[in-house]
Amino acid sequence: MFLGGFIFCCLFVISIAQDETNNKLFPEHFLFGAATASYQIEGAWDEDGKGENIWDRYTHTHPELIANNDTGDVACDSYHKYKEDVAMLKELGVDYYRFSLSWSRILPTGFVNKINLPGVTYYKNLIKELKDNGIEPLITLYHWDLPQPLQDLGGWTSEFVVEAFAEYARLSFELFGDDVKYWLTFNEPKQTCLDGYGQGSTAPGIASPGLGEYICAHHVLKAHARAWHIYDQEFRTTQNGQVSITIDTMWCEPATDSEEDVAAAEKALQFTYGWYANAIYNSDYPEIMKTRIAERSLAEGFNQSRLPSFTDEEISYISGTFDYMGINMYTSILVEAVDEVPVGEPNYNYDMGIKSSQSDDWESCSIYWLKITPWGIRKLLNWLKETYNNPAIIITENGVTDDGSTLEDEQRVRFYRDYLSNVRSAMEDGVNVIGYTAWSLMDNLEWRQGYTQKFGLFHVDFDDINRTRTPKISVAYYKKVVETHCLVDTCEE
Ligand code: NOJ
């Protein structure tokens, strides 16, 4: 195919400095994949009966908030070009493709009263094309694109959305589950809630700091648990798949060895990852969140904690709702202890109460928040193992962005090599990592950064009506890793 010659001539990059790289083979059954998400790639925003979602509304009504006024109206046009996407996955040789369903493409009103058959057909076709090419689908049910009619009723701050999501999940299992072995209920719920309903910096743009994000998270956790139980009770015996959630965090490195900074770093992990993970992999919210938010809320004049509480029944219903652990990880921060911020306005960051920074010594890429810290993923994986009783882990996203100026993305080659090297070392430490997913299969709409940030292994020409896809040199490297299960030229067993 058209990619072959390019990849062959670029294999030289694989030999770039790899002295420090872990040279152990990944186990035979280790899974490699690549990921995308519906709003970021599909386009066809109002085609064939698809309903409006909160990102359609946000980009259309607040173009000034998105770089270059970009929208996902056309994006990579994957609604029409999914066969090209599958051909790229085939070229990479990956075991699975992580993509998300657009809720409003299947259910334009958000509710199951109206099923949009062309939307269902699109996903059936995509899944068939994947299976015909020997690639397993790993489906995310919710990657941030809530149907707008549900937002009009309050979205994730309203209790009704829990049942609406549960019904959408059940329908998705019914429609697609015979061909799907891996599911994720939610992608990065922290961003959904903190940015969407706390800080108001992304869709739906509700700014309710210190309140909105906690109420949202409460409903997301209940909705996740409902979907997991529905699968467990109604589908597991016939479909035999696995359901989880993927939560993101940066690795939080204590700025010094002091007891205070070490405790602050642990607190930061609990406020970011533990906020969602503790209820699922252990039980209830982390103690430190319950205590701190209750204390600050009362001092602020509330009669109860701004962090909602679960009943005992809810705690046991949510606990254990996972078949594996999903984790998205890109970067690290340095964490320092700070004096308690005086009580005033409610705010998640004050509730957490730490100072964070990134070292100037850490390599940068084209986006401000992503400093390249491969060692951080090994530390994070070990922390997950210790904190959550050694679950089977799939890294559901990891990757780096560039500015699109070159197809010779040597930084991405080094990024994948060095992060994967640390993943392999974490496995030697005893962490049970079973899969790794590159973000992203191709350049796509990076939310408020629009098309200015390019996370893809494949370049997409957004000025070209055909949205032509071209491999960057990182395709050759990742393809070789997937094929050989080895990060260097020769590996040991
Ligand atoms: C997290 C999100 O899941 C994904 O949508 C986003 O594009 C990447 N990380 C990169 O920021």
Image (cartoon, grey):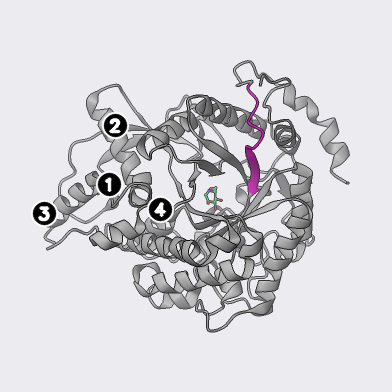
Label number found at residue 294: none
Quarter containing the C terminus: top right
Residue 104 at least partly seen = yes
Q: The disc labelled 2 sits on which kind of residue?
A: Glu
Q: Which residues are magenta?
A: 24-34
Residue 467 at least partly seen = no
Select label 2 or label 4 by which is in front: 4
Earlier along the polypeptide chain: callout 1 or callout 4?
A: 4
> What secondary structure prevails in the magenta region?
loop
Mark 2 touching mark 4, by CB under 8 A?
Answer: no
Q: Which residue is mark 3?
A: 299
Label number found at residue 336: 2
Give the Cα distance between marks 4 and 3: 25 Å
Give the Cα distance between marks 2 and 3: 24 Å
Position in image of residue 290 (x %, y %): 21, 50
Residue, x 37% and y 65% (percent of image)?
Answer: 206
Give the Cα distance between marks 2 and 4: 22 Å
Q: The disc labelled 3 sits on which kind of residue?
A: Ala
Label number found at residue 286: 1
Question: Is 325 on the left-hand or right-hand side of 310?
Answer: right
Q: Which residue is mark 4?
A: 190
Q: Is residue 32 above or below residue 261?
A: below
